Structure formats: C-alpha cells, structure tokens
Image: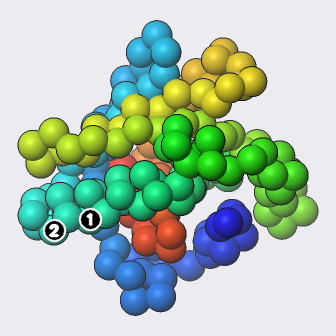
C-alpha cells in the first residue's frame, strides 16, 4: 500500500524516482453526470508509442488492484479500479488524512477505469461508494482549476511517476 508520504513533494519532478521513466502528458478533463472523464495525450516531444506502452502498463497495474495516487498542489486523490476496491477491504489507513508537514490534507478516494483510445488514454473517475458526489465534483473542479493555473498534476502508480498538465 503506497502512502502519500512516499512521494517526495519537494523533489524535482523532472527527476524520476528509482530510475523510473518519467512520463509527461497533457490532460483534458470534463465533468459528466456520474463522474469525471480525463483524456491524457502524450506531451509534445514525448514518443507516442512509449506513452501508449506506459499508459497500458498503468492500466494493467490498476487492473491488478494497485492504487494510483494523484497529487496536485496540496491535494491528493487515491484512485483504484473497481476490482481492486473489491479485493481490498476498507483499511483503517485509507481513512486517515495524510499529514504533510503537520497540516491535514483532504484525501479523496475514487474509482477509476482506464482504457486506451488511439494514442490517448481515457480515464473515468467516479466517487467511491459512500462518498458524496457533490464533494467529489468539487474536488475535481478544484484540481482542474489548479491545473488551469499552471500547477502540474503528479500521478504515480506503483512508484511509476507521470506528470500531467493542461498545457
């Protein structure tokens, strides 16, 4: 189980962790009635075939029940596939708010389905059972606004980082 503390927030985002390839992607998100749809495309200068392989790997990791952590600003979101959620009983530590530098930080948990469409990766995020849809939408809108303001979104799944921005 990966926790938010394993992700160095102050580390240079261009430095991959543990020799992992760093993926750069542009992200477009739109809200839908039942969740948020995100479209990730390879960033300029990023090889499409490599992006596709990495995106497929991320989707496969999630299918194996690994959580994906997303960070934007001081907000974090944990996404898991539906099967992963069924496998994983609600652990006490998932309900804890990660403490960063002594400040409680809202941590959102959501369900995510990823699929490839051409060169793009489509991710659909939906609130988990027992989670308020209104709150989920508010958090998604905030993340979108943060990215519009130029903050990159860091995602990592199983230690593999991916940096997304709306540029």
Of all residues, the one furthest to the front in this rendering is 87
Residue neighbourhood size for the residue with mark 1, other residues' Cα within 10 Å, grouped as few (<14), some (14–19), many (≥20): some
Q: Provide residue 72's location: percent of width, then percent of height.
A: 56, 50
Q: Mark 1 falls on what kind of element? A: helix
Q: Can you tell which mark lies on residue 124?
A: none
- Of 109 and 129, the residue lying toward us: 129
Camera sees residue 105: no
| Residue 112 visible, this orientation | yes
The circle on residue 50 is: 2
Name which residue lies at 52% across and 43% down: 83
Q: Mark 1 points at which residue?
A: 54
Q: In this view, does 32 lie above or below 160?
A: above
| Residue 22 pos. (x, y %) | 34, 73
Q: Quadrant of residue 123?
A: top left
Q: In this view, does 87 lie to the left or right of 91?
A: left
Residue in the image at 39% along x and 77% along y = 14
Foreground residue among 72 and 124:
124
Q: Distance between the residues labelled 2 and 1?
A: 6 Å
């Amino acid at each position: 189980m990966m926790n938010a503390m394993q992700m160095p927030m102050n580390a240079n985002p261009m430095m991959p962790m543990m020799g992992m390839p760093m993926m750069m992607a542009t992200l477009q998100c739109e809200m839908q009635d039942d969740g948020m749809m995100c479209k990730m495309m390879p960033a300029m200068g990023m090889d499409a075939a490599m992006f596709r392989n990495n995106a497929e790997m991320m989707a496969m990791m999630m299918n194996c029940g690994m959580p994906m952590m997303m960070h934007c600003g001081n907000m974090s979101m944990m996404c898991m596939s539906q099967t992963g959620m069924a496998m994983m009983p609600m652990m006490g530590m998932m309900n804890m708010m990660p403490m960063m530098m002594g400040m409680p930080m809202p941590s959102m948990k959501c369900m995510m389905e990823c699929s490839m469409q051409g060169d793009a990766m489509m991710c659909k995020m939906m609130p988990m059972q027992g989670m308020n849809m209104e709150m989920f939408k508010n958090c998604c809108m905030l993340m979108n606004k943060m990215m519009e303001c130029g903050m990159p979104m860091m995602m990592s799944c199983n230690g593999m980082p991916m940096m997304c921005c709306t540029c």
